[in-house]
């Protein structure tokens, strides 16, 4: 059996063309079968009524009439008679009325009503077809037909008189009269049909017009044949036009008003007389009560001022009461009709709201007076004291200066180094948490914060519930650091999460870096601010191995932090609970990791290994549970962290601070930046230069560890509130530096880099902390000896992974970089090299 279905081709357009409502047209004629039938019947009936002796009433004329009136016999007959035998109309009216009932014509085809116009052109086609029809068998003479006789025995004619309705047949044409346009008074041609008797009103108007013509001496417009509608329109036009033109051309108004009635003129004259101001010289515009004053054809100077201006509204009176009073009193002079508003300057109007004492001043002076007057009495002395206090307050307020910009701050000229030495601040250390994806970094840090009581029980409980709802209850501790909804839903860290905690000796800042390879740039940004690193290794079977593979992040992260100058790593052998707290597993991991890290350039004395479980909390803050690790009696993770040597800060060097984040739009502090001070120091009121934009800014506030401070030094994480700089000149990765020795913007540099992959002259992204810029390695200068840095090979064509090389790099835009900055080179989402800018 064939798989193909038989499909009938339907041309829908054709089908629709042939269809008109519910009928199909008869072929050739273009007239539908229904129309043809009605036309035949109508022709017969019309002929029957009017007979065949009226000249001009041919079958064609009847058909056209029928077509025009949708086969309405009565209307067709009336039309034919009025056209071809007007004299018979009156006589035929009664016949047709009767005939209308007698023939009981079919109701008009409703669907045709809306297509009258289009159908008119089809009459020819219709008549062609109808002409072929046989003529009616007989013709009835109009005079021989008596409707009353015909319907003599019709029961419905025997209606009691009081119940009979009057049949009113509408005239085909509008009757003559004022509005009909047939009145001679309007000059319109008179129609023979329907020229009714002139109404009283029309007669009156005609008489007035005649009189008007006499008065005006006959002007253009008088007697000019115009249709009433044209007259009406022109009147309307003149009315509205006059309203606007009256003031500008008062003399023209008399011309425009030539066809206006004397009655209007008289009325206006009467009004003017009563007011005693107008001397009218000719016919006036029709009375316009609202705009009478505006339309007056007299010069403004001849009028009384108060008559020329409209009465103020109640709103105006409320707003400007006093001013308006004064205004109405200025009789006999032109009044400036610009209303003066309070609180505008003297130069603009005569009114000055600040001329006199303010309401507050009035109250204060009244209080003072009452204080003085009441002297000697008990309450009077109290009021006197209040008056004194008020005076003092007044003096204080008057001494206040409003000239200074509220954002400007005065330098405090502090000895920052002396302050720093005196402050004896706690050792501060930033550490970045690195490791393969899902090694348990966030959970471990969450545990640390929880056990150190930085995060309370209730919050963790809340996270547990919320994480449980989306089936990730094991992530509750990680949620302490992973705070965005995306991170929580996906169960991965995306950006560096910053948290703080304090021990007795040290203030720690945690930089929890993402483990996923897609977010390496964020990890680089975090690592750039770190003093040391915590490398988290997943001890569970297979996970440690995958993190250690060529593309595993355990290795990549370790190499990256090394390239960025991090020398110390605390290695947390995590998830040991999944390895049954096996000593062997711990040793295996330790061995392999130590071997790798030392080859990557770390010194073994800077590496420490701690077995733990972030999930259970064993050996993180508290010692491991009884019997879990009898083989281990070393420090807990927190103890390892505390063992970190105090870091020496480059406080004496010129200021450098990389912008890590920008906050805009605060009410008190419209523009703030955060970051870690790499070197130098500053204080409130200092001016700094932002690079690469080379824009100056003023430090108007400093927060160190969320506490306001007047100064800050290298190594501290700060929030700076800036002023006098447009935010468009600031972006993350920019460098704030001292204006005396600013960092330079450069477009090319040489760097000593360790290759993670094959390096050739290629496009790379250059990363330095938050700053990253597209560029390319333009030349491979030499391959270097890893031990002593001597040249092994000049101008190599390729640098293999693991080799040290000196390369030349160019960047697309000038960026603030200087030696000995550490840079990372990445291409196609992979870190290809990292090293030191020379
Ligand atoms: N059994 C066990 N599971 C753990 C431990 N630490 C973390 N986990 C689980 O490991 C999974 C990943 O934990 P995270 O803390 O999100 O890992 P991460 O390294 O921060 O993940 P990324 O930042 O996305 O790379 C979660 O299901 C944790 O519950 C642990 O010590 N023992």
Image: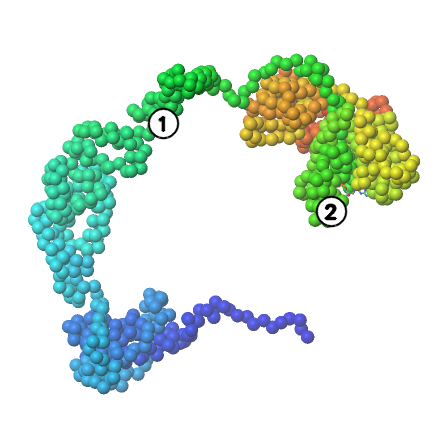
The quadrant of the picture occupied by the C terminus is top right
803 on left or right of 763: right
Residue for badge 1: 343
Residue for badge 2: 472
Identify the element where label 1 is drawn: loop
325 on left or right of 762: left
Work out whether residue 179 or residue 745 is closer to the camera in this orientation and state it: 179
In the image, the residue with mark 2 has its CB under 8 Å from the nearest atom of ligand 1: yes
What is the x, y in percent for residue 519? 72, 38
How many numbered marks, from 0 up?
A: 2
What is the x, y in percent for residue 363? 38, 23
Identify the element where label 2 is drawn: loop
Work out whether residue 359 or residue 50 is closer to the camera in this orientation and state it: 359
540 on left or right of 124: right
Inter-mark Cα distance, 2 to 1: 65 Å
Locate residue 179: give its quadrant.
bottom left
- Residue drawn at the location 19% of the way across and 74% of the way down: 93
Against 793, residue 438 (above or below) is below
Locate residue 778: give its quadrant.
top right
The quadrant of the picture occupied by the N terminus is bottom right
Instruction: Give whichever of discs 2 and 1 has the lower sequence position.
Output: 1
- Residue drawn at the location 11% of the way across and 57% of the way down: 203
Q: Is residue 667 visible?
A: yes
């Amino acid at each position: 059996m064939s798989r193909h279905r038989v499909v009938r081709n339907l041309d829908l357009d054709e089908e629709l063309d042939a269809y008109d409502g519910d009928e199909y047209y008869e072929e050739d004629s273009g007239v539908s079968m229904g129309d043809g039938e009605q036309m035949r019947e109508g022709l017969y009936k019309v002929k029957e009524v009017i007979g065949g002796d009226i000249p001009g009433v041919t079958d064609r004329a009847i058909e056209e009439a029928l077509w025009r009136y949708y086969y309405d016999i009565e209307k067709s007959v009336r039309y034919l008679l009025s056209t071809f035998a007007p004299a018979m109309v009156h006589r035929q009216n009664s016949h047709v009325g009767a005939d209308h009932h007698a023939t009981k014509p079919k109701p008009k085809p409703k669907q045709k009503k809306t297509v009258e116009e289009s159908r008119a052109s089809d009459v020819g086609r219709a008549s062609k077809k109808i002409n072929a029809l046989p003529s009616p068998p007989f013709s009835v003479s109009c005079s021989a037909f008596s409707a009353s006789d015909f319907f003599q025995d019709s029961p419905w004619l025997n209606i009691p008189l009081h119940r009979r309705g009057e049949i009113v047949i509408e005239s085909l044409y509008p009757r003559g009269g004022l509005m009909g346009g047939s009145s001679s008074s309007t000059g319109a041609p008179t129609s023979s049909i329907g020229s009714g008797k002139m109404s009283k009103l029309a007669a009156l108007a005609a008489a007035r017009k005649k009189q008007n013509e006499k008065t005006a001496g006959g002007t253009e417009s008088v007697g000019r044949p115009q249709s009433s509608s044209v007259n009406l329109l022109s009147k309307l036009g003149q009315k509205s036009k006059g309203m606007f033109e009256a003031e500008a051309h008062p003399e023209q108004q008399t011309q425009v008003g030539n066809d206006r009635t004397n009655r209007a003129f008289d009325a206006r004259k009467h009004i003017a007389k009563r007011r005693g101001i107008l001397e009218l010289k000719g016919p006036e515009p029709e009375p316009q009560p609202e705009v009478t004053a505006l339309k007056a054809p007299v010069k403004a100077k001849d009028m009384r001022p108060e008559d020329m201006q409209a009465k103020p509204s109640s709103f105006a009176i409320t707003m400007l009461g006093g001013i308006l009073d004064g205004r109405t009193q200025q009789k006999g002079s032109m009044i400036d009709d610009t209303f003066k508003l309070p609180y505008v300057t003297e130069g603009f109007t005569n009114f000055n709201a600040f001329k006199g004492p303010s309401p507050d001043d009035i109250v204060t002076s009244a209080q003072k007076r009452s204080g003085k007057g009441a002297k000697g009495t008990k309450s009077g002395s109290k009021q006197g004291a209040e008056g004194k206090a008020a005076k003092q307050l007044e003096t204080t307020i008057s001494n206040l200066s409003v000239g200074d910009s509220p954002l400007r701050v005065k330098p405090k000229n502090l000895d920052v180094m002396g302050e720093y030495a005196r402050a004896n601040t706690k050792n501060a250390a930033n550490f970045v948490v690195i490791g393969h994806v899902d090694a348990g970094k966030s959970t471990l840090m969450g545990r640390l914060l929880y056990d150190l009581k930085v995060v309370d029980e209730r919050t963790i409980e809340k996270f547990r519930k919320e994480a449980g709802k989306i089936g990730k209850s094991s992530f509750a501790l990680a949620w302490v650091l992973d705070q965005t909804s995306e991170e929580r839903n996906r169960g991965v860290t995306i950006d560096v999460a910053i948290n703080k905690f304090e021990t007795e000796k040290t203030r720690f800042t945690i930089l929890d870096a993402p483990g996923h390879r897609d977010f390496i740039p964020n990890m680089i940004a975090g690592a750039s601010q770190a003093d040391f690193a915590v490398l988290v290794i997943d001890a569970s079977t297979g996970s440690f191995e995958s993190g250690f593979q060529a593309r595993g992040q355990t290795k990549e992260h370790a190499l990256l932090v090394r390239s960025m100058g991090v020398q110390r790593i605390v290695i947390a052998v995590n998830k040991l609970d999944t390895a049954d707290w096996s000593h062997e597993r711990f040793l295996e991991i330790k061995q392999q990791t130590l071997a790798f890290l030392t080859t990557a350039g770390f010194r073994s004395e800077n590496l420490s290994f701690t077995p733990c479980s972030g999930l259970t909390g064993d050996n993180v803050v508290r010692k491991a549970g009884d019997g879990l690790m009898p083989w281990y009696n070393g420090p807990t993770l927190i103890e390892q962290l505390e063992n970190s040597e105090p870091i020496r800060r480059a406080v004496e060097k010129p200021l450098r601070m990389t912008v890590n984040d920008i906050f805009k739009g605060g009410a008190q502090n419209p523009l703030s930046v955060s970051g870690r001070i790499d070197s130098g120091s500053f204080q409130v009121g200092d001016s700094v230069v932002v690079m690469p934009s080379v824009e100056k800014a003023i430090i108007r506030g400093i927060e160190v560890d969320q506490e306001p401070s007047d100064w800050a030094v290298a190594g501290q994480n700060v929030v700076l509130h800036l002023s006098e700089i447009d935010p468009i000149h600031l972006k993350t990765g920019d460098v704030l530096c001292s204006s005396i020795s600013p960092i330079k913007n450069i477009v090319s540099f040489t760097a000593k880099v360790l290759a993670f992959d094959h390096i050739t002259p290629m496009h790379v992204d250059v990363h330095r902390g938050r700053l990253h810029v597209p560029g390319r390695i333009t030349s491979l200068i030499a391959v270097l000896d890893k031990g002593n840095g001597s040249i092994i090979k000049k101008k190599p064509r390729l640098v293999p992974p693991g080799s040290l090389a000196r390369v030349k790099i160019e960047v697309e835009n000038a960026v603030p970089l200087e030696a000995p900055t550490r840079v990372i080179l990445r291409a196609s989402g992979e870190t290809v090299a990292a090293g030191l800018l020379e």
